[in-house]
Amino acid sequence: MLTVYSAQLSLMHPGMETKQPVAVTLTTPKAQELFTFLRSSYIDERSGLPRGIPQHEMRTDDIDGFPFYRPEPPKILGRLPELKPAVLYIFGKSSDFSSPDARQEKLQTTGIGVGGSGGASRGWVQEVVLPCGHLVPMDCVTETAQASADLIGSELLFGNRKLRSSRKLGEVSHIVSE
């Protein structure tokens, strides 16, 4: 059986006349939003959702008994040491998914492995913590855009310097004649 969900916008204060843009709130149930991000690892017939089976999608040591799971994060976390490009983590301070310990683990792990960038100690991994929850770019739009633009700008400058250096090397004759 296919269950179809729909989201509707409703006025926050119906009947209130205003000349300003009208504020709206999403009427999507919180459970639906949760199941967009996580899979349940238990059976609850009231939800109408099938039970997830984390053991079929994850390594046993990555299952912590939490009632919800996603198979992707442990896999991604395991590959972070190999990450080569510059990284800017933008975290929400009050996010349940980005505790200070979890943020620190990502900062200390990213780029430090074989093929990686060298990590935070070499300046390739940075973080910004914004005063919001998990949906950072929706809650702190301007701050997220500014932090991203700052990193992109510095990476473009670095790339241009690297390109100029490469071009200079290309101009040097590598053929030695006697």
Image (cartoon, helix red, strand yellow):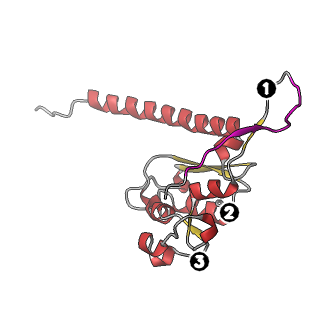
Question: What is the C-alpha distance between the residues marked 3 and 1?
Answer: 45 Å
Task: Locate residue 9, reporting x and y percent.
Answer: 71, 38
Residue at the spot of label 2: 99
Q: Which residues are magenta?
A: 4-18
Residue drawn at (15%, 34%) of the image: 176
> The residue tagged with tag 1: helix, strand or loop?
loop
Residue drawn at (41%, 35%) of the image: 162
Q: Amino acid at mark 3?
A: Gly
Q: Which mark is residue 21?
A: 1
Tell me which corner region of the image, top left, top right, bottom left or bottom right, holds residue 26: top right
Residue at the spot of label 3: 65
Crowding near the residue tagged with mark 1, few <14, some 14–19, many ≥20 C-alpha atoms within 10 Å: few
Main SS type for the magenta part?
loop
Q: Amino acid at mark 2?
A: Ser
Q: Amino acid at mark 1?
A: Pro
Residue 152 belongs to the span the image colors magenta: no
